[in-house]
Image (cartoon, rainbow, N blue to C red):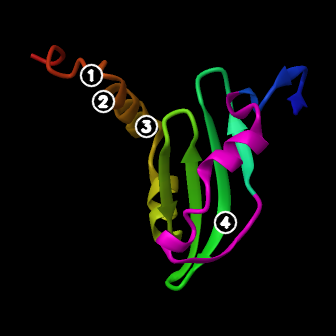
Amino acid sequence: MTHNGTTTDQGVSGLEEAVEQIGDESAAEGIIEVGEWIGIGNEFTGVLVRKVWTRNGERLELHVPAKKYTAMLDAMQLEIVAAQDPQQFSWLFQKKLGSDDSSTSGS
């Protein structure tokens, strides 16, 4: 897919292959119905997203094929994510990528 001449899903190129590699983990997670996967990506990463229905309600399932990360978030968890300011995400990036220099800043 392109937008303004740039590839917007290059982080999840081969969407069909990535979906096949996920396999059928639905039963293990108590998923009773699933929506279609969509891919969101950039030059650094790619994420697959779909809506799923479980015995405990609706969830948004996120999957990062390159890292094999998966998360299922309910509406309350998504509300908390949406309430974060961009600085909180910057802090999470630093922590996850090991570039947390908070110990050297300040005093």
Circles 4 and 2, Cβ within 8 Å, touching? The answer is: no
Residue numbers of the magenta segment: 11-36
Number of residues whose C-alpha sits closer than 10 Å to that of mark 4, classed few (under 14), some (14–19) or many (20 or more): some
* Residue found farthest to the bottom: 55
* Residue found farthest to the left: 107
Q: Please provide percent x and percent y for residue 95.
A: 30, 30
Upstream in sequence: badge 3 or badge 4? 4
Upstream in sequence: badge 2 or badge 1? 2
Frontmost residue, 43 versus 105: 43
Circles 3 and 1, Cβ within 8 Å, touching? The answer is: no
Residue pointed to by mark 2: 95
Q: Is residue 37 left or right of residue 86?
A: right
Say if the magenta span includes residue 18: yes
Q: In which quadrant is the N terminus drawn?
A: top right
Amino acid type at image mark 4: Lys
Q: Secondary structure at mark 4?
A: strand
Upstream in sequence: badge 1 or badge 4? 4
Residue pointed to by mark 4: 51
Residue visible at 45% across and 64% down? 77
Upstream in sequence: badge 3 or badge 1? 3
Q: Secondary structure at mark 3?
A: helix
Disc assigned to residue 100? 1
Q: Secondary structure at mark 2?
A: helix
- Tell which tag, 3 or 2, sits nearer the viewer: 2
Check the image and report above or below for 60 versus 91. Answer: below
Spatial separation of the CA atoms under disc 3 and disc 4 = 23 Å
Spatial separation of the CA atoms under disc 2 and disc 1 = 5 Å
Say if the magenta span includes residue 35: yes
Residue pointed to by mark 3: 89
Q: Please provide percent x and percent y for residue 46.
A: 63, 34
